[in-house]
Amino acid sequence: MHNLSPLPQYLIKRYQGWKATAHAENHAWYRRLANEGQRPRAMVISCCDSRVHVTSIFGADSGEFFIHRNIANLVPPHAPDGLQHGTSAAVEYAVEALKVAHLIVVGHTKCGGVAGCHAMCSGQAPELEEKTSFVGRWMDILRPGYERVKDLPAEQQVGALEKEAVLVSIENLMTFPFVRSAVEAGALSLHGLVHDIAEGTLLQAEDAGNKWVAV
């Protein structure tokens, strides 16, 4: 039995408004996207956090970005073990099938996943250590980043770990043979950003992540 419920009315009204305005005014473009397929120039890996809206940040229209979202914008290491890997599958499709030119990892301030990882790694969240915690096992990806920030002053650690979530993901992307070969061939570029939700600013990683500069 499927426990399905009707869509909330407020979402139905928003959809109807979009269909009558934005879609109607750009019907030819949507029809072209449907008939010709997608040709995004970039893949964006960002957090599930509802406050992170990358299409708005970059003023992107439908068809511009191939977007994958997960907890804390993490990419796991390449692991060809025959199991199910959603993030790795998305990266493979973007690079191998869509031939995107840019792969952008977007982190953000006040990330709950990163804060949870910090609490877990510092012994303050034993519930995340349980094998049954999907969030905890996912945040294990960021443990190498915690090791790099754990000796900083306490008030700086979580902010630094938000940057590490981006850098660890970039490092792990380079463990995928098809990503590495595309980067080395000059067909793909990797980018790391951190978005400050309150201020609306973007920091960009440079010098292998040793420096962060304002965009």
Image: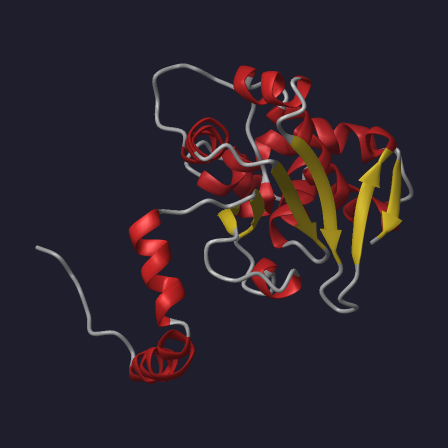
The residue drawn where x is 46% and y is 44% is: 39
Residue 57 x/y as whole percent: 66, 63
The residue nearer to you, when weighing 26 against 105, is: 26
Position above or below: 182 against 189: above
The residue nearer to you, when weighing 188 against 133, is: 188
Q: For residue 208, what is the image quadrant? A: top right
The residue drawn where x is 50% and y is 48% is: 67
The residue drawn where x is 41% and y is 36% is: 132
Residue 215 x/y as whole percent: 82, 54
Residue 182 visible in the snapshot: yes
Q: For residue 128, what is the image quadrant? A: top right
Number of numbered discs on residues: 0
Residue 124 visible in the snapshot: no
Q: For residue 134, what is the image quadrant? A: top left
The residue drawn where x is 34% and y is 17% is: 82
Image quarter of the N terminus: bottom left
* 88 with respect to 28 (left or right): right
Residue 211 x/y as whole percent: 89, 38
* 206 with respect to 10 (left or right): right
Colour mapping used in the image? secondary structure
Residue 146 x/y as whole percent: 74, 33
The residue nearer to you, when weighing 153 against 61, is: 61
Extreme residue toward the left, this view: 1
Position above or below: 90 against 114: above
